[in-house]
Amino acid sequence: MSDDKQRWEEFHKDRVGANYPRWPNEFMLKTIFGSYLKEPVRLPERAKVLDVGCGFGNNLLPFLDRGHECSGVEITAAIAELSQQLLADRGYTARILEGGNRRLPFPDAEFDLLLSLNVLHYESTEPAIEAALREYARVLKPGATLLLMTVGPRHEIYERATPLGGHQYRIANYDFRNGEQYFYFDNTKYLERYLTPGFERIELGRSTEELFTTTVDFLVSVARRRS
């Protein structure tokens, strides 16, 4: 197991029983269930939903409550098992498997909605980003929806990072991820450029908040897999 994966396992284990996220991402809720998009997300009954990098499973809760069939992936089997157990402890059934952005253990055209919330930038090179987006498109049904959220250029983690060139950065002076290499989109136009080969009807947004001493900044897109 790589050092990066080991650190993520330790992070998840340390958070359980203490302060792990128990509620869905607020921006995801607004985007999927609100009225902010030109083309609202309309899921079929018993939709199939996939959360890539599902963490503690919290972002699947609103879909499970609505009776949708939910799956997730995490980068190690131990984290996947932990996420599935946390959901089971809350009375939910979901399928959480080991996998990642470029390795989704599901058939072609399986899902109606794919959530990628702050996980794509863990692919540290342009070819890896492109491969991940192809994999997202592969497991989505034609016309199905991708919700993608990634760190924006004013986010504290980005501003502390060391630039390496070519949209690549190394995290520094932040947390247990220090030393990891990331790929950042400088603005929504770059995000659109990478999405265009596999997706259409692309809507782009940005969420920036000044939270006292910290700035959090995210680039967001809702797009449909090309038919």
Image (tube, rainbow, N blue to C red):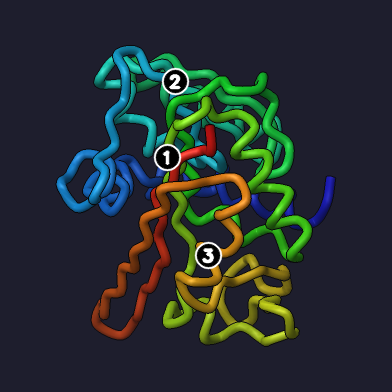
The crowding category of the residue bearing disc 3, from other C-alpha atoms within 10 Å (few below 14, some 14 to 19, many at least 20), is some
Residue 89 % position (x, y): 39, 20
Location of residue 200 with respect to 90 vertically, above or below? below
Contact, mark 3 vs mark 1 (Cβ under 8 Å): no
Quarter of the image for residue 121 reads: bottom right
Nearest to the observer: residue 40 or residue 167: 40
| Furthest residue toward right | 1
Secondary structure under tag 3 reads helix
In front: label 2 or label 3: 3
**Is the N terminus in the top left, top right, bottom left or bottom right quadrant?**
top right
For label 2, the residue is 48
The crowding category of the residue bearing disc 1, from other C-alpha atoms within 10 Å (few below 14, some 14 to 19, many at least 20), is few
Location of residue 27 with respect to 71 vertically, above or below? below
Quarter of the image for residue 64 reads: top left
Q: Amino acid at mark 1?
A: Gly
> Measuring 57% from the left and 25% from the top, which residue is drawn there?
96
Q: Which mark is residue 2?
A: none
34 with respect to 188 (left or right): left
Q: Which mark is residue 17?
A: 1
For label 3, the residue is 191
